[in-house]
Amino acid sequence: MPLLRLQIRLPRRRGRSLIRWIRRGLTGLRAALALYLGAAAIGGLLPNGVTAEARAEPADTILLINGPIHYDILIPVDRVRDTMPWLARQGIALDHPDVHWVLFGWGARDFYTTTGSYADVSPRAIWRGLTGDSAVMRVSVAGVVDGSWPTVTASPAQMQRMITAISDSFADGAGTVALEHAGVSEFDRFFPGTGRFHLFSTCNVWVGQMMRRARIRFGRWTPTPYAVTLATRRFRQH
């Protein structure tokens, strides 16, 4: 009988140990998430080291448009038509009379190219987005955009540097060919991008990198949408 009782108790002890292990794991994950989000907020408020530039010339406008987890950069179509005409050959409607803006975004290939809603994203795409995935560029167009989105003002030199930085984000530059993949809408295309996407190099980090390359004051590290939002508010953006 004592041996029988021992055999009955062992699974209970193991079960309790497993529950304690799960609880500790969840506590660790919560702590790691809090640390990540806190660092992102601080990174959005810290300056990227760019000195404010006096603007004697008329300024251009760059728009930042976000969804629940992602920011995109919108550039006036006139600036893109003159500097990236190869996009028209890949199906981007740069010459359409109703197009005012060209949208650029960078993201994880599996996650970003999923059509439909976020509910359609597979666990595999989420895992690869967290741990490392090849990057893609999304390009789309927009008409008149309301004034509720954050704006960034840029001198002609800063705008040119911004467009150069965005161009460098395409894997083959002007020779990049659109992927054979349905876009988020009928107006956009996906292209192979440079770099690797992971938890510490996200689509929102890319936005901050484009600002730094353009020599525009912005947050030092912006991995989350909230970090980008803080940066636009902190560094004289509207």
Image (cartoon, helix red, strand yellow):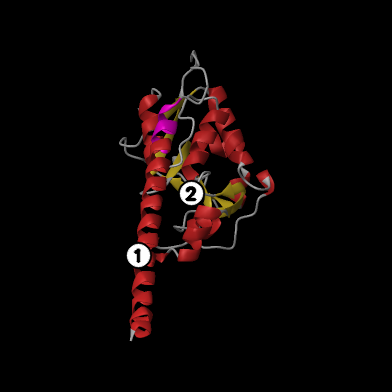
Above or below for 163 versus 96:
above
Secondary element type, mark 2 = strand
Question: Residue 80 at x, y = what percent?
Answer: 55, 38
Name the kind of residue labelled 1 in the image: Ile
- For the magenta stretch, what is the residue range? 40-46
Above or below for 49 versus 64:
above
Is residue 102 visible in the rendered structure shown here? no
Q: Determine which quarter of the picture holds residue 219.
A: top left
Front-lying residue, 213 or 143: 213
Left or right, 120 with respect to 181, comes to left
Residue at screen point 38% across, 83% down: 3
Question: Residue 18 at x, y = what percent?
Answer: 39, 66
Task: Measure the alpha-carbon separation of dots 2 and 1.
Answer: 48 Å
Secondary element type, mark 1 = helix
Name the magenta segment's main secondary structure.
helix
Q: Which mark is residue 56?
A: none
Q: Which mark is residue 19?
A: 1
Question: Residue 114 at x, y = what percent?
Answer: 47, 61
Q: How many marks?
A: 2
Residue 41 belongs to magenta span:
yes
Report the quarter where the N terminus lies.
bottom left
Residue at screen point 56% across, 39% down: 81
Residue 187 belongs to magenta span:
no
